[in-house]
Image (cartoon, grey):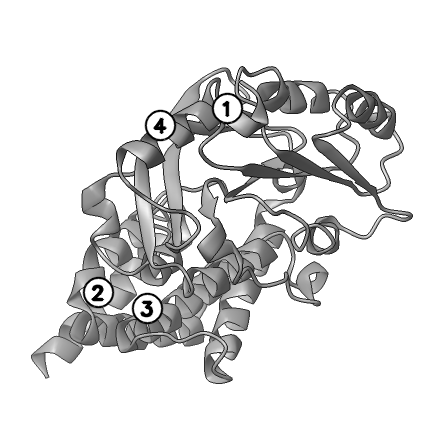
Amino acid sequence: MRKSQQPFTHSFIVVTYNQAAFVKAALDSILNEDVLPDEMIIGDDASTDGTQGILDEYQKKFPEIIKLVLQEKNCGIFENLNTLTSLPQGDFVHFLAGDDIYAPGYIDNVNRFVLGNGIDPRSESFVLIPHVYIDLPDGRRKIHKCTESQVRQGTPLSLGLREKITYRYTGISRAAFVNWPLYPTDSEEIGVYADRLQWIHFLQYVARLIPAPFPGNIYRAGVGISARTNARTQQISYLNSLNAIKELAKHGSITLSPADSTFLNFEIAFRKAILDPGVRQYMELAVRSAELLFASPGDIPTMSMMFAKQLIRTPFYYMLRNVVSNATRALRS
């Protein structure tokens, strides 16, 4: 289908860095379709493995679609993204990493779904949540499907804060994307989870999350930067992102509900106890858990699941026992 025949225009932002082994599959998943995007903005972060040569070939093949942005020096994924996000003009904006792919028929599925539901990406602020496929290194595939009951549990921001929606930056309406914030200047210091800070910041401008009944992004687990980052470094980055969210809320850049603030304080204490288990951290966690029990009982299942995931590690058994004991005493007093 020619671009002019589409009911909506589509922009893809693709970021690459030394992904010569994967980037062809990534681009082909979009460009080998019957329905083509209106533009594909590719930002390469000074690759040295032949990725740029592959991108040049595709740009020559699709000159009307591909806009190639080659960084002069390696600046990191977040700065690379910041140079790209002001460029797309489509009714929908979709992101893709150079080592992931989109499911077949994705653009056509978006068009049909949006038309069938009478949604206008130009005037309505929303994000589509299609199925997310996660291909594991052992060959297994996990499938995450978002449902209407999930998105009705809270605002987009509150759902994102609690990670109740699995999402891969797809199907962002033009009316929402105009509020897309830049990744913070200290993203490299925050670490791999700096994108979580930016995502929470963005979600406060999104009116609706809309489950879409078709596959979207296919994520290759064990391939990207997260796979090369050890567990403790990831935990530190996650905690950094939570503290940064709290700072943005403190200065008014993010508006959190009382329940969101209480949950954020609990999760900060929880992550600190993971990183540095000890009496002081456990007592702080006990206090924050009790606050959550009183102020936001709807978060009890989420809190329970967070604890349950850590029970396989001995220190966390004692953490949970201490938290439950202290919370019980607080409830009785």
Please tell me which residue lies in front, 115 or 199.
115
Q: Which residue is mark 3?
A: 263
Residue 148 visible in this rendered orientation of the protein? yes
Q: Position of residue 18 (x, y in %)?
A: 79, 32
- Earlier sequence position, callout 3 versus callout 1: 1
Q: Which residue is mark 2?
A: 324
**Can you say whether 260 is above or below 143 in the image?**
below
**Which of the 4 image quarters holds residue 214?**
top left
**Who's the residue at 49% across and 51% down the image?**
174
The kind of secondary structure element at disc 4 is: helix
**Who's the residue at 50% across and 44% down the image?**
91
**Which of the 4 image quarters holds residue 132?**
top left
Q: Position of residue 284 (x, y in %)?
A: 37, 76
The kind of secondary structure element at disc 2 is: helix
Q: Amino acid at mark 2?
A: Val
- Earlier sequence position, callout 2 versus callout 3: 3
Q: Amino acid at mark 1?
A: Leu
Q: Which residue is mark 1?
A: 136
Give how far apart the Cα atoms at labels 4 and 3 are: 38 Å
In the image, which disc is placed on residue 112? 4
Answer whether labels 4 and 3 touch (C-beta < 8 Å).
no
Please tell me which residue lies in front, 189 or 56.
56
